[in-house]
């Protein structure tokens, strides 16, 4: 595998810096729309993700924000290969299992074989949005949390029970509750069970797909605090998918904003919130209500016209041109803006980037 | 603000379940004035939606029942109205819009059809006149091309458009009170901003009072004149928007504010989190219902139920220690 990386370098492909955990290059995911029963003809495709690139460094949290249909969850699922990417590279540098001294290898998740995938699956986990749908109601808490260990043949029954108890304690639940069923727990507690399951295999990378969106505010804070503690304790790297920009500001080190299958802007947190440059980022931020009447009164909202276009037939040029208050025609409707580094580590895909103070 | 429009006194709405009686709303009183924008905030299970449904008399026995209380609307007790009189109030003088416009609209009728039906029913006009009013109503909520949209079925519209149709339907009969139950919760933020903007514009124009029910303190901060915070079926705190946010009296309100992430600031430390979860409302024990999660609880909180007290002008709080607590720590210290 190391050799393959060297080969890639020889081919002129991008090198992967040592601190990188994941490097996504030009990820594309289309869902075909077919017609006919026997000869399923592809008549169109939902272009959920259309060529996005980003990276995540070890130990950091990258947030991806956007509205429904922007492709953020599809991106996360491609990274975990729960969906097969249509094209693109998903380079991942996992810990080589068991042996930290050995130089970790870089694997392209999109091309990994069955054997490699099995190893990767131990290293990458996911916590889902809906704690009601993501836990099997017929399984006890112990069997839910122990299942990943069972699948990967780790330990015997008593080891696994010990580990389950330890995990319950780690996520702040009562270790005596191993034989209870999910319905006996509240939403926040269920989300903790989901987190315990994700931690069972000692992963280094976790996708958090809207982990607090279904929870009440007071419970959200509990879970967000827990995720922060766990990251510190186990040196976890997070990919945090969310639609709520204020939650993202609180938990992420760097943030990417997506719109209709494309990345609009990526920057570290403070840069993005202090001087966002993409008009969509401005609109999105200005729409988020702030729980402070004094601030709210003086804010100017950018109200976007109309609805998000269909990803089956996205607008040509910049995807945001149909709703952008700053679009200039024909440039924005013909010429697709590339991601450009406007200042260090601040990437924007816009022909007319401009700092605007929104918060 | 002028005449009281809706006066609810000592409302108790209970539901019977197999496990026992759920006291969903348990002794709630409040007043909404003409043209007022009144926010009701609380987490799931706090009784905010049940309050709205009680006002609309949409609590269906035997499952649920309004046990006691008085709901005066323009001086008339809605609980004593005959069913067909209530039907005229509902949709005519008090309109309601819901969280999920897809389930509130009938999928097998065009939106034009549904709008016209409402207008004919409440305004006693003929079909063709109702058609004109419906077109105007759609135009008012800024739906492009209303003539064409009239023939659309709900599934042909986006979520934001559907909510616009609901607002058009709700306001088509010029109600005095619009009850909006989490109207933007199912929508994306940019759409939420559009809808709130629209509601503000239309209700201000017509001097319609709004009762906005939400779990999002951010939404009420920009929209409401007065806010009522509920917890476990009871009033926790009520006052002007400024009072609630800046001169918070109740530990629960402070806890909610402290546990919210904010777009415009990062907290110095961890978020404040209210420990535990809301209590069961089946046979709740005496005393303050928030006490097990409260950082300031003392012995008296377990024995005596705190009644709402007016501690500032129109600023009510139901806490034994309301004015002597240091809640700044709870609300969190921001780093800007």
Image: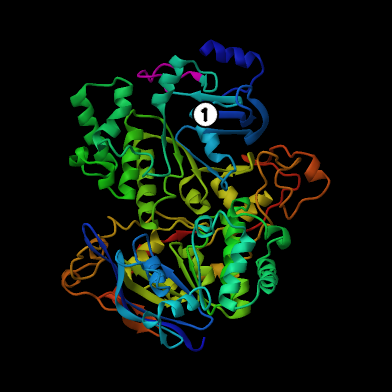
Find residue A342 and report its image quarter: top right
Residue at the outermost right position: A330
Q: Chain of mark 1?
A: A
Please say whether residue B270 is visible from this viewpoint: no
In front of the other: B251 or A262:
A262
Query: Are there few (<14), some (14-19), or many (20+) residues within 10 Å of tag 1?
Result: some
In front of the other: A165 or A97:
A165
Residue A96 coordinates in the image, percent (x, y): 41, 19
Residue B230 coordinates in the image, percent (x, y): 35, 69
| Residue B214 in the figure: left or right of residue B194 | left
Q: Which residues are magenta?
A: A95-106
Residue visible at 30% across and 75% down in the picture: B318
In the rendered image of this protein, does residue A85 appear above or below residue A72? above
Please say whether residue B125 is visible from this viewpoint: yes
Residue visible at 72% across and 37% down in the picture: A338
Residue visible at 60% across and 26% down in the picture: A37
């Amino acid at each position: 595998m190391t050799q393959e990386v060297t080969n890639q370098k020889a081919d002129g492909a991008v090198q992967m810096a040592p601190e990188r955990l994941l490097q996504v290059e030009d990820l594309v995911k289309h869902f075909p729309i077919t017609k006919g029963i026997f000869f399923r003809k592809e008549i169109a495709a939902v272009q959920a993700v259309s060529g996005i690139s980003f990276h995540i460094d070890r130990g950091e949290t990258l947030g991806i924000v956007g509205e429904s249909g922007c492709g953020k969850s599809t991106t996360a699922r491609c990274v975990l290969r729960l969906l097969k990417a249509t094209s693109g590279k998903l380079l991942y540098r996992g810990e080589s299992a068991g042996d930290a001294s050995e130089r970790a290898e870089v694997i392209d998740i999109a091309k990994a074989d069955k054997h490699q995938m099995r190893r990767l699956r131990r290293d990458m986990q996911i916590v889902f949005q809906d704690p009601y749908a993501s836990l099997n109601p017929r399984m006890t808490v112990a069997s839910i949390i122990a299942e990943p260990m069972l699948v990967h043949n780790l330990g015997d029954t008593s080891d696994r029970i010990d580990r389950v108890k330890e995990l319950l304690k780690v996520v702040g639940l009562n270790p005596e509750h191993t034989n209870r069923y999910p319905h006996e727990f509240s939403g926040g507690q269920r989300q903790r069970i989901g987190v315990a399951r994700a931690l069972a295999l000692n992963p280094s990378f976790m996708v958090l797909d809207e982990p607090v969106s279904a929870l009440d505010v007071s419970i959200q804070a509990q879970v967000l605090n827990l995720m922060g503690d766990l990251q510190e304790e186990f040196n976890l790297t997070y990919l945090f998918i969310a639609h709520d920009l204020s939650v993202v500001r609180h938990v992420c080190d760097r943030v990417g904003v997506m719109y209709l299958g494309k990345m609009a802007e990526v920057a570290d947190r403070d840069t993005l919130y202090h001087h966002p440059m993409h008009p969509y980022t401005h609109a999105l931020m200005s729409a988020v209500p702030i729980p402070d009447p004094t601030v709210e009164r003086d804010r100017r909202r950018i109200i976007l016209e109309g609805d998000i276009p269909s990803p089956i037939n996205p607008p040509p040029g910049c995807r945001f041109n149909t709703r952008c208050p700053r679009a200039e025609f024909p440039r924005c409707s013909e010429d697709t803006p590339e991601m450009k580094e406007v200042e260090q580590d601040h990437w924007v895909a816009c022909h007319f980037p401009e700092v605007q103070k929104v918060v | 603000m002028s005449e009281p429009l809706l006066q609810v006194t000592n409302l108790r709405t209970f539901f019977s379940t197999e496990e026992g009686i759920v006291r969903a709303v348990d002794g709630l009183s409040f007043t909404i004035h003409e043209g007022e924008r009144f926010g009701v905030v609380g987490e799931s299970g706090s009784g905010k939606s049940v309050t709205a449904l009680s006002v609309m008399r949409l609590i269906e026995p035997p499952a649920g029942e309004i046990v006691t209380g008085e709901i005066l609307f323009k001086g008339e007790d809605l609980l004593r109205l005959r069913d067909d009189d209530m039907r005229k109030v509902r949709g005519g003088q008090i309109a309601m819009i819901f969280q999920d416009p897809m389930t509130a609209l009938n999928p097998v009728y065009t939106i034009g059809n549904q709008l016209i039906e409402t207008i004919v029913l409440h305004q006693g006009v003929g079909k063709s006149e109702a058609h004109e009013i419906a077109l105007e109503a759609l135009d008012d909520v800024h739906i492009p091309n209303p003539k064409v949209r009239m023939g659309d079925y709900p599934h042909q519209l986006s979520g934001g458009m559907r909510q616009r149709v609901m607002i058009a339907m709700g306001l088509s009969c010029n109600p005095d009170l619009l009850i909006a139950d989490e109207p933007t919760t199912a929508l994306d933020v940019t759409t939420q901003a559009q809808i709130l903007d629209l509601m503000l514009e239309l209700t201000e124009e017509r001097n319609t009072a709004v009762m906005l029910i939400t779990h999002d303190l951010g939404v009420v901060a920009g929209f409401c004149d007065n806010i009522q915070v509920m917890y476990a079926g009871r009033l926790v705190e009520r006052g002007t928007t400024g009072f609630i946010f800046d001169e918070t009296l109740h530990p629960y309100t402070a806890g909610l504010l402290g546990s919210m992430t904010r777009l415009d600031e990062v907290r110095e430390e961890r978020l404040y989190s209210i420990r535990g979860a809301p209590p069961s409302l089946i046979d709740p024990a005496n005393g303050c219902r928030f006490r097990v999660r409260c950082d300031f609880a003392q012995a008296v909180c377990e024995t005596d139920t705190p009644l709402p007290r007016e501690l500032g002008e129109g600023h009510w709080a139901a806490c034994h220690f309301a004015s002597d607590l240091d809640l700044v720590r709870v609300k969190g210290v921001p780093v800007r």
